[in-house]
Amino acid sequence: MKFYNTLIDWYLQNKRDLPWRKTTNPYPIWLSEIMLQQTRVAQGMPYFLSFTTAFPTVFDLANAHEEQVLKLWQGLGYYSRARNLHKTAQIVAHEMGGAFPDNYIDLLKLKGIGEYTAAAIASFSYNECVPVVDGNVFRVLSRYFDIKTDIAQASAKKEFAALAFELMPKDNPAQFNQAIMEFGALQCVPKNPNCSICVFNDSCAALQKGIVDQLPVKSKKLKVRNRYFNYIIGIDEKENTIIQKRTAKGIWHNLYEFPLIETEKVEDFDTIAQQIQDCFPDENKVVSLLEYNSESIIHKLSHQHLHIKFWKATLKGTLGKGLDLKAVKTFPFPIVIHNFIEEKL
């Protein structure tokens, strides 16, 4: 009870003024939770506002074209979230009459909604007594109670969820969930938390034992894979270029890119020059080639580091499916390509 009372007192004094906290409507709550996965609030807020402006209801989102959704999502990363968001909106709008399921179990059945998101929507929208367990909650509970369970293990979520459920007041689970997540986001932060001003500094087990920086325990991530991308910007006699959609499963599915030569390592000018004609029709001969960036741009994803170089190929004739720059800018691209287009083209 002491933990709960102290936590709520802190929350009421320190909570951020966030738009999705001002409603119990599951639609904006769902949007915010999907957007804030792997994303800081400061980064996610502009996207939330853009989406709720463009798609004020789940019907508006459901009826949008996928490319419009991906374009608005551009730069937020983990693009499968956007594709799942769109598909789920279509299910809710067209199969459920626009009404989200009103309980945790049924919310879990929707595409892209896992245990954490289902718990968040169920508690915030319907006050269902189900705990949320995200990185913030793992961190707060592991430190306060000195729990050394490896949070990368599948069993960890059940253990922490059971503890959170025990601590949670059954008459106001929504406030408890918001409070413990906010405490982890603002006070009990991953690195160098200011424990001297923490409201729990007289009762936190990790602080008493001097092991705050050791918790939560998490096994090392998978080895990062390095990939080497050479994007070829073909420019024809009309100053048009071509782009293509990434249709294969994997990173950036359904986003657009320039013709790509993927290599095993950083390659030199001569190696790329030998392969470049394969990117274009035979009638559009490559007449010159130059590098836009001599040093690779390193774009870091969760389990991949992409080493990216952009090349300009001047082409003979006109491209059959060529697009001018204004048209190109309307398509959804990975943010690293979008930034290149804005800066160089």
Image: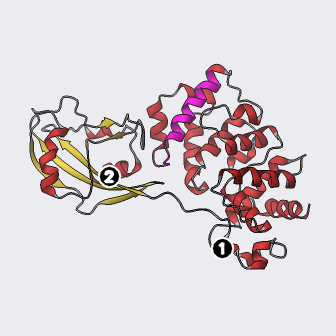
Q: Element type at marker 2?
A: helix
Element at badge 1?
helix
Count residues near mark 1 (Cα–Cα under 10 Å), then give few for <14, some for 14-19, many for 20+.
Answer: some
Extent of the magenta region? 74-94
Q: Amino acid at mark 2?
A: Phe
Of tags 2 and 1, the one toward the viewer is 1
Residue 290 image point, x, y percent: 15, 54
Mark 2 or mark 1: which comes first in sequence? 1
Front residue of 162 and 327: 162
Decide if residue 55 is in sight here.
Answer: yes
In the rendering, which numbered label is found on residue 213? 1
Residue 139 position, x and y percent, is: 70, 63
Residue sitting nearer the eye, 57 or 247: 247
Q: How is the image coloured?
A: secondary structure
Depicted 187 relative to depicted 26: above or below: below
Mark 2, residue position: 340
Identify the image quadrant of the N terminus: bottom right
What amino acid type is highlighted by mark number 1?
Answer: Asp
Q: How many neighbours does mark 2 have within 10 angstroms: few (below 14), some (14-19), or many (20 or more)?
A: few
Residue 23, quarter of the rendered image: top right
